[in-house]
Amino acid sequence: MRPSLVAANWKMNGSGDFLRDYAERLELDQPLKIDVVLCPPSIYLAELVRALRETGVACGAQDVGIQPSGAHTGEIAAEMIADAGAEWVIVGHSERRIDQNEKDDLVATKAAAALRAGLKPIVCVGETLAEREAGHEIAVVERQLEAVVDRVDLDGLASGAIAYEPVWAIGTGKSATTAQAQEMHAFIRDKIAHVDAAIARKIRVVYGGSVKAENAEELFGQDDIDGSLVGGAGLDPIQFAEIVHAASR
Ligand code: PEP
């Protein structure tokens, strides 16, 4: 499939000044040919949505609470994210799996909460370096994927994406080789095809892990790499635009 989604995860970076400057400097060929998404810290979502109005660029949150409302201090409901004008949400990012000890079951519940509110989930899966060195990368990704696929509405899931993000490639400057990425993406698609072949053809499987303008084109040339979830390079509007343009060719 041609790449059709490039999303930036700003992680815990940014400020009001940063987002206004970013929105001014982000120059993309219009009309957009693919889905382009910026995921700032949630506190900046509503302002970023306003700043990007008329550009076709959508916004997403980096995490979501599982309840729709109520006595859950500090949580942000999927419905609130949608109310702020965002359309997407990242779930199961490895930094949350590691820092917040999020387990597969919780990630699946978060994906279901996102779909309940009409948000498109970007479900992150990926192995650690120790897991890859032990030869367990396929088993780990399979387990993470199954938890979500068994739990959520697949048509809804196909509105979003699966992001393969090997933990050892995130923020390290060490991207997976195109062959390593393609192999895992093909596995993910095949695994989904065993449940529903039509969904497997439709769902975007995007790659994340030290994607930059320089390596984007080669990654996007692979059959099963349908775009990217970008971290560090997504903090620079010039570099992010180059990645979007590489995916749009
Ligand atoms: C990420 O945080 O999802 C990510 C892929 O980061 P980076 O591009 O910096 O490796």
Image (cartoon, rainbow, N blue to C red):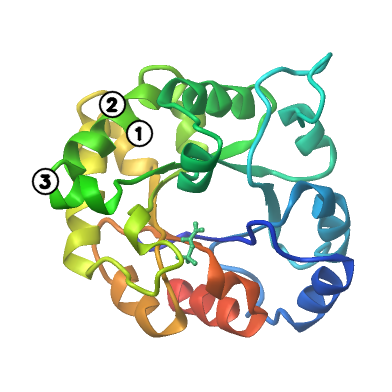
> Residue flagged by tag 1: what amino acid is it?
Ile
Residue 208 image point, x, y percent:
41, 59
Q: Secondary structure at mark 1?
A: helix
Of the residues under marks 2 and 3, which one precedes in the sequence?
3
Residue 28 place in picture, x, y as percent: 65, 78
Q: Amino acid at mark 3?
A: Gly
Q: Position of residue 59 (x, y in %)?
A: 71, 53
Q: Is residue 194 left or right of residue 24?
A: left
Task: Report how far apart the C-alphas of labels 2 and 1 lie in the structure.
Answer: 5 Å
> Which residue reaches farthest top?
71
Q: Is residue 87 visible?
A: yes
Label 1, residues with CA under 10 Å away: few <14, some 14-19, many ≥20: some
Helix, strand or loop at label 3? It is loop
Residue at image mark 2 = 196
216 to 214, vertically: above or below: above
Residue hosting label 3: 135
Disc 3 versus disc 1: distance between alpha carbons? 28 Å
What residue type is disc 2 on? Asp
Seen at 39% across and 42% down, the residue is 203
Which numbered mark, 3 or 1, is in the foreground of this view?
3
Of pointers 3 and 1, the one earlier in the residue sequence: 3
Q: Circles 2 and 1: CB distance less than 8 Å? A: yes
Q: Which residue is mark 1?
A: 199
User: Comparing marks 2 and 3, which lies closer to the viewer?
Assistant: 3
Q: Position of residue 40 (x, y in %)?
A: 71, 56
